[in-house]
Image: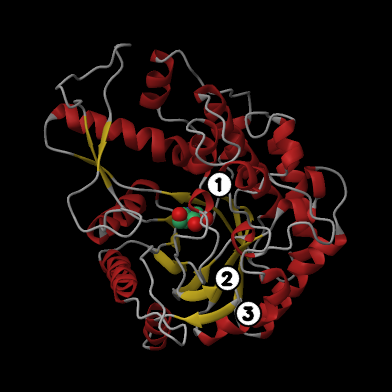
């Protein structure tokens, strides 16, 4: 099985041209303006610099480029006919990529829900899943003759819980019930889209952000807490997709909290439409303890304590722990538990880059992070995990959501004043690693 090397981006984070050629606002345009204070209005100006950016990808020698389609560019306001000018952009992007010998990996939903659909209830509203399927049909109709790799939803956990429970991502709501409904409808949308796209020769799947829920100790209380964290973070998405059922322990836990998922007859059959690949977005692993700092095992409502603990290891500049060994463990676990071919669709790190006078960044720490995680992937493969690709996050510095532009994940430095792109050391490392073969 060949191994695919790639770099990844998403539409709102790089495109800019927020109000051009018929694009309408997404929830991230609104949230960025009202809450973050920096927006994707210009971002990396990729919409206007796309052919050069494709050449940049080519210069890294990778096989594939993972990008997302902006829903409000292609279907303004989230319903009705396609905006041909929006589709034309992705048509040209795909042609540029193929012309450069780069395989397009297209993601349909990377967080930019049309604002009008949020105004109609957003992902907690069941209708949004059907609107997503309609939008998928428009993109598929235009690009299916050239795009083989289709990603459905990116990191639905972030969409549902950061966006609807914690309110730290768009649309900024704080409502656990809404987050649960969003979870189910994102899965439903994924299933409807998968059925529409999947045919012989295509490769379809979601991309989930998956950490490791490691018990803080071998105390059964900590083991139970880690199991619940894994249930609420990973199995609540993966079990319905791969097994056609939500995990029983998660449903019991939700019931104890007076909650449930808005499941209707037939939904789980749709959600469990066969997939070809599971995209894994990995940044760090976490520990979980079942006691709070006072030693209590239940909270005031009598529900079990699940306390996240960051492993005591070096951190990136986002304060995220660096845990490549756990990455190997995670890939093996996914392989054994679910048996679906895997691709690492995102992995990367923020560091405080200091460009020299020429714009070059000698990002030794990011390079070491990526090298260690690539090694972790190959260790998992050597131990039997069917991992078919690695995409570094991200091709270039971009709009890092609630963090704005201050936090840089790029392998290529972007000077936002001039839009000059300069490959960092990590980009050159990746190029050399790809050249040396899998
Ligand atoms: O930038 C994001 C990306 O859009 C989704 N996955 C995590 C990345 C880093 O936070």
The answer to whether residue 278 is visible is: no
Mark 1 close to ligand 1, CB under 8 Å:
no
Residues at marks 3 and 2 touching, judged by CB atoms closer than 8 Å:
no
Residue 172 drawn above or below residue 345: above
* Label annotation for residue 54: 3
The answer to whether residue 429 is visible is: yes
The quarter of the picture where residue 376 lies is bottom left
Residue at the image point whose x is 57% and y is 82% from the top: 56
The quarter of the picture where residue 92 lies is bottom right
Residue at the image point whose x is 68% and y is 29% from the top: 126
Q: Earlier in the sequence, mark 1 or mark 2?
A: 1
Residue 189 in the figure: left or right of residue 430: right
Q: CA distance from mark 1 to mark 2?
A: 17 Å
Circle 1 residues within 10 Å: few <14, some 14–19, many ≥20? some
Residue 144 in the figure: left or right of residue 81: left
Residue at the image point whose x is 40% and y is 41% from the top: 234
The foreground one among 408 and 103 is 408
Q: CA distance from mark 1 to mark 3?
A: 29 Å
Q: Residue 140's spot in the image, x, y percent?
A: 75, 58
- Identify the residue under disc 1: 36
SS category of the residue bearing label 2? loop
The foreground one among 438 and 211 is 211
Q: Nearer the viewer, mark 3 or mark 2?
A: 2
Residue at the image point whose x is 44% and y is 49% from the top: 209
- Identify the residue under disc 2: 416
SS category of the residue bearing label 3? helix
């Amino acid at each position: 099985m060949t191994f695919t090397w790639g770099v990844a981006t998403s539409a709102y984070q790089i495109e800019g041209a927020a109000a051009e050629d018929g694009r309408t606002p997404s929830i991230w345009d609104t949230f960025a303006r009202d809450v973050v204070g920096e927006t994707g209005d210009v971002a990396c100006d990729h919409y206007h610099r796309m052919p050069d950016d494709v050449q940049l990808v080519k210069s890294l020698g990778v096989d594939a480029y993972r990008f997302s389609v902006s829903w409000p560019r292609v279907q303004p306001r989230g319903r009705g006919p396609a905006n041909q000018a929006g589709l034309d952009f992705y048509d040209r992007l795909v042609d540029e990529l193929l012309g450069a010998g780069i395989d397009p990996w297209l993601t349909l939903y990377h967080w930019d829900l049309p604002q009008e659909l949020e105004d109609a209830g957003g992902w907690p509203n069941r209708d949004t899943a059907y609107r997503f399927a309609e939008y998928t049909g428009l993109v598929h109709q235009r690009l299916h003759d050239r795009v083989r790799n289709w990603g459905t939803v990116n990191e639905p956990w972030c969409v549902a819980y950061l966006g609807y429970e914690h309110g730290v991502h768009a649309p900024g709501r704080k409502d656990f019930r809404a987050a649960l409904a969003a979870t189910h409808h994102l899965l439903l949308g994924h299933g409807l889209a998968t059925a529409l796209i999947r045919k012989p020769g295509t490769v379809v799947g979601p991309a989930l952000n998956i950490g490791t829920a490691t018990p803080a100790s071998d105390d059964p209380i900590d083991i139970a807490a880690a199991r619940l964290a894994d249930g609420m973070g990973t199995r609540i998405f993966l079990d319905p997709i791969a097994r056609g059922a939500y995990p029983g322990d998660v449903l019991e836990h939700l019931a104890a909290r007076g909650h449930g998922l808005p499941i209707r007859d037939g939904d789980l059959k749709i959600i469990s439409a066969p997939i070809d690949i599971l995209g894994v977005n990995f940044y760090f692993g976490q520990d979980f303890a079942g006691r709070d700092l006072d030693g209590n095992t239940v909270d005031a409502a009598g529900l079990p304590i699940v306390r996240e603990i960051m492993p005591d290891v070096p951190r990136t500049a986002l304060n995220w722990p660096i845990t490549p060994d756990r990455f190997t463990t995670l890939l093996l676990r996914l392989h054994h538990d679910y048996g679906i071919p895997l691709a690492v669709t995102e992995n990367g790190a923020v560091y405080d880059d200091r460009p020299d006078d020429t714009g070059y960044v000698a990002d030794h720490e990011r390079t070491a992070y990526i090298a260690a995680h690539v090694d972790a992937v190959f260790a998992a493969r050597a131990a039997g995990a069917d991992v078919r690709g690695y995409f570094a996050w991200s091709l270039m510095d971009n709009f890092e959501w609630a963090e704005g532009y201050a936090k840089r994940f790029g392998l290529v430095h972007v000077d936002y004043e001039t839009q000059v792109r300069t490959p960092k050391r990590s980009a050159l490392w990746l190029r050399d690693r790809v050249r040396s073969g899998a």
